[in-house]
Image: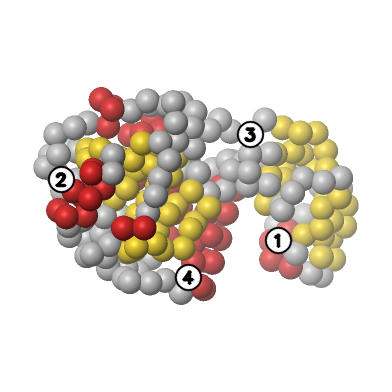
Amino acid sequence: MAPHRVRVEALAPEMLLGPRETRHLHVLRLNPGDAVRVFDGQGAEAGATLTLLEEGRAVLTLGERLAGAAETPQPVTLAVALLKGDKLADVVRAATELGAARVQLLVTRHADAREIGAQKLQRLRRVAEEASKQSRRAVTPEVLPPLPLAEFAWEGTLFVAQPGSVARLTDHLNWDAPVTVLTGPEGGLAEAEVAALTARGAVAVTLGPRILRAETAPLALLGALVATGV
């Protein structure tokens, strides 16, 4: 069985864990002397030894540095419109597994919500952290607070999923610069929103002949993207 993975703020000779991670170690019935793995969410990973486990407090001692799971040649951002219920959590979880470096939430004309509370945003960040543990990534994506679509800026190439487009992602993709993929809410982006993005250099691409749900489209586009960069 692979050692339990622990997210830490930074790799250091000794690392003090807070109450939440410590509770998890108790649940797993770990004991001082047991081996774990630590990662900082920025790509660094190492072995470690649990040297102290008390109520609400645990200490790890750093071991050998390890190679983290391979990442895409350039960082990938998923920009996604606000969705209802737990759909965003599902998207963030799968985007983490697929290799997104960050998730930017967007407020669009037809978005299911206009804002997100601090508590829900924090929950999405925890979802990303747990997904990076489960998928054995050394990187935990940032989950950024919502921006109005008109204020969204990007580096490199932006691909926008838009039904009716004829361009295919693979015809325009290269890994010379960061890549962003953007998907809209249920009902899609307004034509004026897509036009404004393409006027700024974005490329509208097809996801095939079918209309995908708002929580499916970002993962289909992200999956097609990262499959070319392994």
Outermost residue, front direction? 199
Residue density around tag 1, few if under 14, some if 14–19, many if 20 or more, within 10 Å: some
Distance from Cα at disc 3 to Cα at disc 2: 37 Å
Distance from Cα at disc 1 to Cα at disc 2: 43 Å
Residue at image point 23% right, 43% down: 198
Position in image of residue 169 (x %, y %): 27, 32
Residue hosting label 2: 163
Tell me if 204 is positioned left or right of 182 in this view: left
Asked whether the beta carbons under mark 3 and mark 1 sit within 8 Å of each other, the answer is no
Q: Earlier in the sequence, mark 3 or mark 1?
A: 1
Residue hosting label 3: 68
Tell me if 105 is positioned left or right of 217 in this view: right
Asked whether the beta carbons under mark 1 and mark 2 sit within 8 Å of each other, the answer is no
Would you place residue 185 above or below residue 164 in this image?
A: below
Residue hosting label 4: 120
Q: Is mark 2 on a helix, strand or loop?
A: loop
